[in-house]
Amino acid sequence: MDSCCIDMQQFDDKGYMQSTQSKDSKGTVKNETTVTHYEGGQVKEYANSAGGKKTGVFSIEINKDGKYSGARNIDSTGKLASFYTDLTEDEYGSVTAGTEHNPDSSVKSSFAAEYNKGLQISTTAKDSSGKVNYTFKAELNDKNDISKVTTTTITKDSTTTKVITYKYDSYDSDGNWTQRTTYDEKGKATKVVKRTYTYYKKD
């Protein structure tokens, strides 16, 4: 397979993500996200760009207890595209449910998600009428890495289900995978991801 792209993620010394960046095979930056956090570590804002141009901001609010209470999706022109209410989270701070609204406050969609120690294993999304239009389910291997993903997309005219599986070809000495192969429903390899890590020094 030919190399298509390079993805980079940077974290601070507390383990909080600071940025993500995607480059094409020529090294040109295609997409970039900068992440800022509240003092307690909760995500405050995702600032997104593509091709060097700002594409939008996802801004998140917390309440007096430090829990996520709402979010706003701002488009590239600075206008409100949608906002979220009724957010809930688990003990790891992963958002488990929420309702998306249009700028006029009408319901646009809703979602419910389940996590296993911070790793997303299921999602159910509903449209404005409350009908399910998307589901995601992940299975984990004995190392708590995703081994199988089943997604179902439901439209007015059709229902499409896709299944992909993952094989982990290698791990580093810290137990993080360094190469993963993706297979389609017919068992054909469709993608290989290779990862390298730079670690902070332990105190």
Image: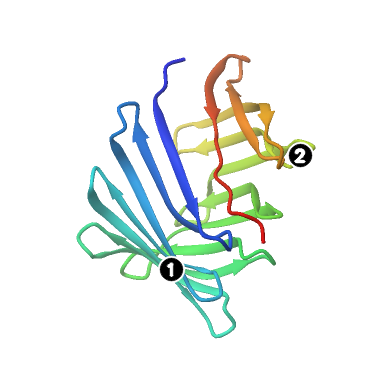
Residue at 52% across / 56% down in the picture? Answer: 130
Residue for badge 1: 71
Report crowding for label 2: few under 14, some 14 to 19, many 20 or more residues within 10 A (C-alpha): few
Measure how far apart labels 1 and 2 are at the Cα level.
33 Å
Residue type marked 2: Lys
Residue at 51% across / 60% down in the picture? Answer: 12
Where residue 16 appears, as percent x and y from the top left, is 54, 60
Give the mark nearest the N terminus, 1 or 2.
1
Name the quadrant of the C terminus.
bottom right
62 above or below 90? below
Who is closer to the viewer here, 37 or 63? 37
The answer to whether the residues at label 1 and label 2 have Cβ atoms under 8 Å apart is: no
- SS at mark 2 in the image: loop
Residue at 35% across / 48% down in the picture? Answer: 32
20 above or below 106? above
Where residue 202 appears, as percent x and y from the top left, is 66, 57
